[in-house]
Each structure stands twice: as C-alpha cells, then as structure tokens.
Image (cartoon, helix red, strand yellow):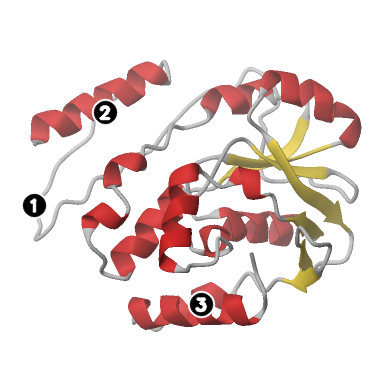
C-alpha cells in the first residue's frame, strides 16, 4: 500500500515535470498526507486578482467526479455507487502557463466550483452572471446524479473539487485561449454589482447564495445537510 502511494507521487511529479524536495513524518491515529508546491515564475504570475466587469469566466475542463465522490461518501453509500478510481485529478499547470498573458485572474477548484467563484468574487469586489453548461459535467458524475435523483447543481455547490482552473479573460482573447486550452468552457461573465446569479438552459434565472451549502454542512451532520441541499435545490428548480 505504501509503495502504491509512493508510485502515485512519482507519476504525478513526472507528469508535472517537477521533483520532490523532501519532508518529514510523524505518527497519529490516522494517515494524513499533505504537500506544498513551490515554484518560480519568469513573467508576471497569474494570481487571483484582476477580474474586471465584462470579462468571461471559464473553467479549464470538466468537473463533477470529485464532488460526486464526496456526496457518495457523506451519504454513506456503497463504494460501487461512485468508484474512487474515477477521481484522479491532475494539476492543470500547463493550462495555467498557457493562459499567462491572456487570463486576468485564476484559481483552482480544489474547494469546488461555487466556492472558487465566491472567493474570486470577494477578492475582486465583483459579481458574476453564471450560465449552466450541462456539457461541463463529467459522464460518471451525471450518471451518478441521475441514478440517485441528485440535482447536478450540487456538483458545483459541494466543496470538494476536481482541480480545474476557473479564470477570467477578456472576450477578445477567448478564441486564442480556446486554441491553447481546448477543453475550456465559458460559464458566465463578471459584472460590477457584487451578487451571483445562474441562468438555466430554459432561460430562467436563479439567484445564487454561495454560502448556503457551507452553512448547512457546518452543523457536522453531513448526511442530513446533504439531504437538505438536495431538497432545497429541487424546490428551487436547480438543474
């Protein structure tokens, strides 16, 4: 088992063309693995600051497997309901490097899509008009939601992500960015007024409270909180 973990580290480092500096170990009741990435940038780095009204918001690739796995785990469902092997996130380092000079701000979705959008919104003092893109959700995650009657919206709302990048970009640079990051998907636009909305495929609009899921899950009763999220999303007609 330890050898498998080490092999995974090695594969990830090779894929990202980086190396292991070292670390230390300790003891405890459970296994906790953590890491910190350090790097140098020869150009002005792409940070979380820089969104401006009118810019397009994009995601670097499909999402859904991470939150689907989290939902399955917190609902205490059987492992086979959503397989852990379907969640193998890859750091989008190459996409981030390709977007230097084009994107104005970016952040990874390790904490989930909606949480990431909220952080960018707060840091930049801007609002967001979002658009629901069904094609952004991965096939395994869509199948899982359909089987269990879970609105796909929870795949944005649950705070467990797929390590994609969410970034802002001027509309005139959008086509150039698509050539460099072919799997990117636009999901909305930055607006001046600091609030969030979601336009559904039928054209209807819903206000979005990015703190709602966090407030429910803060109770610590995750199973009940998720059931309430499902009920609330269905009641509001979320996708």
**Mark 3 and mark 2: Cα distance apart in space:** 35 Å
Q: Along the polypeptide, which appears first: circle 3 or circle 2?
A: 2
Q: Circle 3 sits on which residue?
A: 229
Quarter-wise, where is residue 102 in the image? Answer: top right
Q: In the visual, does 170 lie left or right of 62?
A: right
Quarter-wise, where is residue 153 in the image? Answer: bottom right
- Give the residue displayed 12% in from the left and 48% down from the top: 26
- Badge 2: few (under 14), some or many (20 or more) residues near its Cα, within 10 Å? some
- Badge 1: few (under 14), some or many (20 or more) residues near its Cα, within 10 Å? few
Q: In the visual, does 66 lie left or right of 92?
A: left
**Mark 1 and mark 3: Cα distance apart in space:** 37 Å
Residue 101 appears in the picture as rendered: no
Kindly report which numbered mark, 3 or 2, lies closer to the viewer in this rendering.
3
Q: In the visual, does 125 lie left or right of 83?
A: right
Label placed on residue 9: 2
Residue 175 appears in the picture as rendered: yes
- Give the residue displayed 43% in from the left and 32% down from the top: 90
Q: Secondary structure at mark 3?
A: helix
- Badge 3: few (under 14), some or many (20 or more) residues near its Cα, within 10 Å? many
Q: Circle 1 sits on which residue?
A: 27
């Amino acid at each position: 088992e330890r050898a498998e973990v080490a092999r995974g580290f090695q594969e990830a480092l090779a894929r990202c063309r980086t190396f292991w500096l070292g670390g230390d170990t300790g003891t405890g009741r459970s296994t906790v693995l953590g890491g910190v990435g350090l790097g140098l940038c020869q150009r002005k780095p792409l940070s979380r600051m820089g969104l401006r009204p009118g810019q397009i918001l994009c995601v670097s690739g499909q999402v859904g497997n991470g939150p689907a796995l989290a939902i399955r785990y917190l609902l205490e469902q059987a492992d086979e309901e959503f397989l852990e092997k379907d969640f193998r996130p890859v750091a989008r380092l190459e996409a981030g490097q390709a977007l230097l000079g084009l994107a104005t701000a970016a952040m990874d979705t390790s904490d989930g899509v909606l949480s990431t959008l909220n952080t960018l919104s707060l840091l930049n003092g801007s609002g967001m008009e979002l658009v629901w893109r069904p094609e952004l959700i991965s096939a395994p995650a869509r199948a899982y939601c359909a089987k269990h009657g879970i609105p796909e919206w929870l795949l944005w709302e649950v705070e467990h992500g797929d390590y994609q990048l969410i970034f802002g970009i001027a509309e005139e640079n959008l086509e150039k960015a698509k050539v460099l990051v072919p799997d990117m998907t636009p999901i909305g636009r930055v607006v001046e007024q600091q609030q969030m909305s979601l336009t559904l495929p039928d054209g209807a609009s819903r206000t979005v409270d990015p703190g709602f899921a966090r407030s429910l899950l803060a109770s610590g009763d995750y199973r009940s909180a998720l059931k309430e999220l499902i009920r609330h999303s269905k009641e509001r007609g979320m996708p």
